Amino acid sequence: MKAIFKSNFTEITNETRLMQQKLRIIQVISQNGYGITVPDICKELKISAPTGIKLVNELQSEGFLSIIGKKETQNGRKPAIYALKNVNFYALSVEILMKRITVGIIDSRLNTVYYRQKTDFVLEDTADCLQKVEGFILECLDNSGVGEESILGMGMGITGRVKHETGESLTFFNFLDQPLAQHLSKFFDIPVFLNNDTRCFGMAEKIVGKAKNVNHAIVINLSRGLGTCLVIDNKIVNGGMGFAGELGHMQFGKREKMCLCGKKGCLGNDVGGNALEEIFMEKVAIGEKTMVHIPEDGSSVRYDDILISALKGDELSIDLIQDMGYKLGHALGNIVNLLNPELIIIGGKFSKLRTLLLDPVKTGITSSALVHPMEDCKIEFSELGDLGGLKGAGALVFEYFELIKN
C-alpha cells in the first residue's frame, strides 16, 4: 500500500489513471473516518457508476476494502458500505522541546501505537545536538516493532520559528546548508514535514480534540513557554511565513527582563514555565516561604515541581500561578476583542491546574474583553495530555497524503 503513494503518475495511461482513482477512494474513506457507498464514491470522484463499481470490486478483491453494512434508505435497494480492510497508515512522529524530545508512531486516526520520551535532553543549536536527535529517532524506530515499509513519512514539531512550507527551522539547526526537513528526509530516506510544536498541538486539537467542530478558536500551549495556535474559519492559520500566533511576544508583559527575541515587554517573560521558575526563585531569595524543595547547589526549581506544589496547597506557588493566570487572561481578552473566537482551549503542562488556573484567567479576560464577544466564548482545557503535539506532528504526514482533513 505504501508503494501507491510513491508511484510516479507523470505518464498518464489507463493503468495509472485507475491507480490514481483507487488512491483517491482510499483517501476519501480515510478522510471520512468511516465507511462509504459506491454512489458516494462516484459523486466525490466525479466518475460513472460502472467505473466506481469496477474500482471498488478490484480494491475488494485485492484485500483493501470490505463491506461493513448497508446504508439505510427510504426505498429501493440498500447500497453496501465499504471500509478499509487491513490497511494501516503510520507516521513517524517527533516533538522537540527545550528540555524534552518525544518520538512516536502514529496511525491515521492519530492513535499512538508507540512512543518514548527522553527528559534528560537539552535542545541546542549545534551539530552534536542534531546527531543526538537523529540517534534517538533511529533507536526508537528499532524498538517500535513497526516496519519502516509501513511508515509513510515523518512529522516533526519543534519549538521556535519554523517555515512550514519550506521545512526550515530558523531558531534551531539553522546551520545546515539546506532546510532541516530536507536534511532529515535524506538521512531517514522518507518524506519529512516540519512545523512549530504549538501549531502541531493545534492541529491535533482541530482533528481529534475540542476544536474539531469549531470554526473559530484560540489554542493555548502553556508549558515552559507560551505558544498559541489560531483557528479561523475552520482552518489553522500559519500566516504568510508560518509565524502566526506569537501571543508570547505581544507586548502585554510587565517585567523589565529582556526577552530572547531582543525586546522587553513580551508576555512570555511573565507567563510560562521559564517565567515561573525565575519569579519563584526571586521570591525565595527575598525570604518567601514554600514547601517546594530548594536545591542546595543553587540551581533553579523546575516549574513542574511548582505546579505540583500548587495543587498540594503551597501558598507561594498558588499566588504566582494565579498572577500568571490573570495576566494571560487579560491578554486573551484583547485577542477575544480582535478575533471573536467561540472557544479558547488551554493545553500544555499548566492545564493540570484546572480551576486553580481557570478562575484567574476568567477574571483577567473579564477585565479586558468586551461583554458580548465574551458571552459566546467558552474556555476549556485540552484533554489530549502530553501527546497532543506528537499526534499533531504525525498529522502533518497524513495531511500531505490527503488521508485526513484539517
Image (cartoon, grey):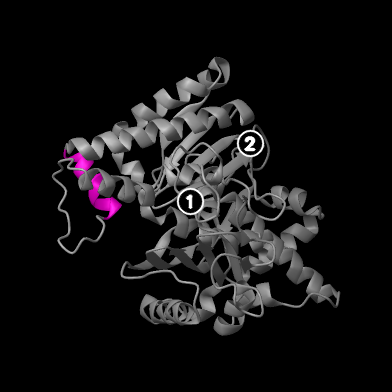
For label 1, the SS is loop
Q: Is residue 400 above or below residue 368?
A: below
Q: For residue 317, which quarter of the picture?
A: top left
Residue 310 shown left or right of residue 357 in the figure: left
Specify the amino acid type for callout 2: Thr
Labelled pair 1, 2 in contact (Cβ < 8 Å): no
Seen from the viewer's position, the closer of residues 160 and 29 is 160
Q: Position of residue 319 (x, y in %)?
A: 26, 34
Instruction: Return the disc, 1 or 2, that comes first in the chain's sequence.
Output: 2
| View extreme (top): residue | 371
Q: Position of residue 113 (x, y in %)?
A: 40, 65
User: Residue 338, labelled with which disc?
Assistant: none
Mark 1–mark 2 Cα distance, whole angstroms, equals: 65 Å
Residue position marked by numbered label 2 in the rendering: 73
Seen from the viewer's position, the closer of residues 224 and 277 is 277
For label 2, the SS is loop
Q: Is residue 252 above or below residue 179?
A: above
Residue position marked by numbered label 1 in the rendering: 258
Q: Position of residue 324 (x, y in %)?
A: 37, 37
Residue 287 shown left or right of residue 206 in the figure: left
Dominant SS of magenta comes to helix
What stretch of residues is rendered in magenta? 302-312
Q: Position of residue 181 (x, y in %)?
A: 61, 72
Task: Name the residue at 57% across, 78% down.
Answer: 184
